[in-house]
Image (cartoon, rainbow, N blue to C red):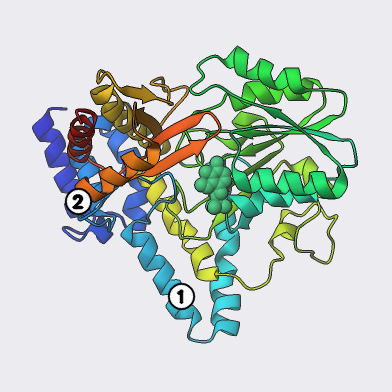
Amino acid sequence: MMKTDRRQFLANSIAAAGAVAVGSFLNKTFGRDLPGSLINNDFQPPVNMVTEEEFWYWIQQSFTASPNVMNLNNGGVCPQPKVVQDAFEHYNRVSNEGPAYYMWQVVGEGREAVRKDLARLAGCSPEEIAIQRNTTEALETVIFGMNLKKGDEVVLTRQDYPNMINAWKQREKRDGIVLKWINLPQPVEDDDLIVKAYEDAFTSRTKVIEIMHMINWSGQILPARKIARAAHKQGIDVLVDGAHTFAHLDFTIPDLECEYFGTSLHKWLYAPFGTGMLYIKKDKIGEIWPLTAPGEPESDDIRKFEAMGTRSFPAELAIGKAIDFHHMIGSARKENRLNFLRNYWMEKIRDIPKIKFYTSFKPEYACGLGNFAIEGMTPGELQKILFSKYKIFTVPIDWENIYGVRITPNVYTTPADLDYFVEAVKEIAAG
Ligand SMILES: Cc1ncc(COP(=O)(O)O)c(C=O)c1O
């Protein structure tokens, strides 16, 4: 299709969806159909859509990001598009008409539909999905809920997330389990080396390993399935920290061949703050004790992990809207765009002599998150000047072998935004 035709197509699509109001562009019916429409119309395959700026402009306008501060720390937590904010506020208002009835009985009734939608996106059965408040809750449910006894071993990396490290350490102190640490170079672009690092730590007492699907400090993607296969050969279970990969990379949870997977939906799915998800493979559910006890803690009903009392039902229900929004963009299209944006800024600063990267340029090993340093500056100094002088918000990282500033654009970040960031880095590096 010619560029002008494409423009016309997009204009027609927007008009069809209810004209100028962005909320209408993103309404549910249209949202479900857009990826199909784009493909059926031979509009652009996902890989080409990465630079279709008219499309991304509309995506940008569906967020309410401040134009006054450039947020390049989407690796912490992501904002919600306006439709998700609206859905959350709507459910909250309805709940307040009489919470015991409207929140518990009316709004709360929608949870099973959310579970089904999440399962469809995750590529598994709804009977394997529990709705949680965040990755921490999801993964710690497994960490504390596993039957492990004194002397049993767990393999994890020095690059794991602190909350999970603390949970394992608590079990070490309390139950006498043994933690075996591996330290991964950053970046690392050798699957065999990564798998071997895990294998070298396995013993006959190893019961479970934790894999960071994407290391939050550097954006490093680990070959989760290859590591899982190596673990399974020795009868070891696999827990995956998917905080950063769900709705960021285009995959299904069964692709990873893990037993347990936890994620935060307020990260890359753009669902309300305080929403997360736990996946447990069907035949393992009965073996995990819930953190908050239901009537039958040994049941194999995944809902036993949701016996947590009153929490934000409006937030949980608005997850459905975030899933619609995600389908509108499409998983492959989103992954490609996030990868494009990271490469865009990294390529433009890679020839500056004093720049060092902790992140790979290869799409197998990195996507939206990137980490870099300028020789002679601490991460804190670099972060500070980016914010005070340029109003670019980033995060300094000083963790194990990673010592730089993490940059995380999002689907609403434009190449023009990144050009501004690149110019700032050039000025700073020039002193
Ligand atoms: C890799 C990883 N795991 C777990 C978490 C914890 O997420 P939450 O605070 O949503 O529980 C984070 C948060 O940034 C993370 O990056």
> In the rendered view, does 312 fall on the left or right side of 406?
right
The C terminus - image quarter: top left
Disc number at residue 249? none
Instruction: Indicate the position of residue 259 as horizontal and vertical percent values.
Output: 72, 37
Instruction: Indicate the position of residue 29 as horizontal and vertical percent values.
Output: 35, 55
Q: Is residue 279 visible?
A: no
- Quick check: is the Cβ at mark 2 less than 8 Å away from ligand 1? no
Give the vertical position of 86 relative to 329 (above or below): below
- Most extreme residue toward the right is 150
**Type of residue at label 2?**
Ile
Q: Residues within 10 Å of mark 1 (few under 14, many from 20)?
A: many
Of callouts 2 and 1, the N-terminal one: 2
Q: How many marks?
A: 2
Q: Is residue 176 visible?
A: yes
Residue located at (84% from left, 50% from top): 174
**Type of residue at label 1?**
Asn
- Most extreme residue toward the bottom is 98
Camera-side residue: 12 or 64?
Answer: 64
Reading the image, the residue beneath label 2 is: 14
Instruction: Indicate the position of residue 42 as horizontal and vertical percent values.
Output: 26, 29
Residue located at (29% from left, 55% from top): 63
Camera-side residue: 411 or 153?
Answer: 153
> In the rendered view, does 6 fall on the left or right side of 215?
left
> Does dot 1 land on a helix, a strand or a loop?
helix
Give the vertical position of 387 relative to 343 (above or below): below
Reading the image, the residue beneath label 1 is: 92
Label 2 and label 1: CA atoms lie apart by 29 Å
Q: Quadrant of residue 225?
A: top right
Residue located at (90% from left, 40% from top): 150
> In the rendered view, does 183 fall on the left or right side of 85?
right
- Quick check: is the Cβ at mark 1 less than 8 Å away from ligand 1? no
